[in-house]
Image (cartoon, rainbow, N blue to C red):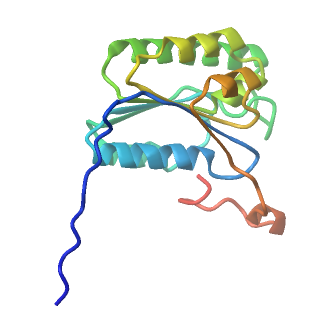
Amino acid sequence: MSKPIKIEKLVPKQPHGLVVIITGNGKGKTTSAMGMVLRASGHGLKSCIIQFMKGDLYTGEWDGVKMLAGLVELHATGMGFCGIQGNPYSHAEHRASAQAAIELAQAKMASGDYEILILDEINNALKLKLVDLQQVLELIKGKPALMHLVMTGRNAHPEVVELADTVSEVCEVKHAYQKDIEPQPGIDY
């Protein structure tokens, strides 16, 4: 009979709130951020997720995070993806929604209630001029020292990348849509 493996819990000598960027054209940016939420929940850390673009089509994380009640809060503030897939809302309506999401992010950041704040698709919102570069830079520079700030979406701005501690680029090698396979629940949304 083999001996059980001893599992250690690491504790950093110097806790540090990180700025993490997950960008690129591949699938899995939001999924990676959600994985961080799951991992953080295992440590008893509280997370807040603000989705800047999603909001008009159901996605499984909305109900999935309810199972982590008390540790995770999710706000789908978007009106869908601006300018694609027949989205009916004007740029001005999308911008107003994204500006409300910026205000919500500032409030959640200032509350002191969360160890992790995820700004899902904020890079896209910046690229589409729904939020301004200065607003995003102020969020990064104004985050509490021990809060982790995770920002997802394609086309991360170079100035945002420069301020980040960790940047990952998700690269598409191939995707099922190239075979005309529809998006699948639990994998794509």
Q: Determine the residue positioned at 64% across, 33% down.
A: 121
Can the viewer see residue 125 in this picture? yes
Rendered location of residue 151, percent (x, y): 58, 31
Compared to residue 163, the image places residue 57 above or below, namely below
Compared to residue 133, the image places residue 59 above or below, namely below
Most extreme residue toward the bottom, as rendered? 1
Q: Determine the residue positioned at 67% across, 33% down.
A: 80
Please name whichever residue, 87 or 105, is drawn nearer the observer in this view of the structure. 105
The quadrant in which residue 6 appears is: bottom left
The quadrant in which residue 17 appears is: top left
Rendered location of residue 110, percent (x, y): 39, 11
**90 sits to left or right of 21:** right
Mark count: 0
Rendered location of residue 117, percent (x, y): 45, 28
**79 sits to left or right of 70:** right
Can the viewer see residue 58 in this picture? no
Compared to residue 79, the image places residue 100 above or below, namely above
Rendered location of residue 48, percent (x, y): 41, 30
Please name whichever residue, 113 or 58, is drawn nearer the observer in this view of the structure. 113
Q: Determine the residue positioned at 68% across, 52% down.
A: 27
**114 sits to left or right of 157:** left
Most extreme residue toward the front, as rendered? 13
What quarter of the picture does the N terminus occupy? bottom left
Q: Determine the residue positioned at 20% across, 86% down.
A: 2
**146 sits to left or right of 138:** left
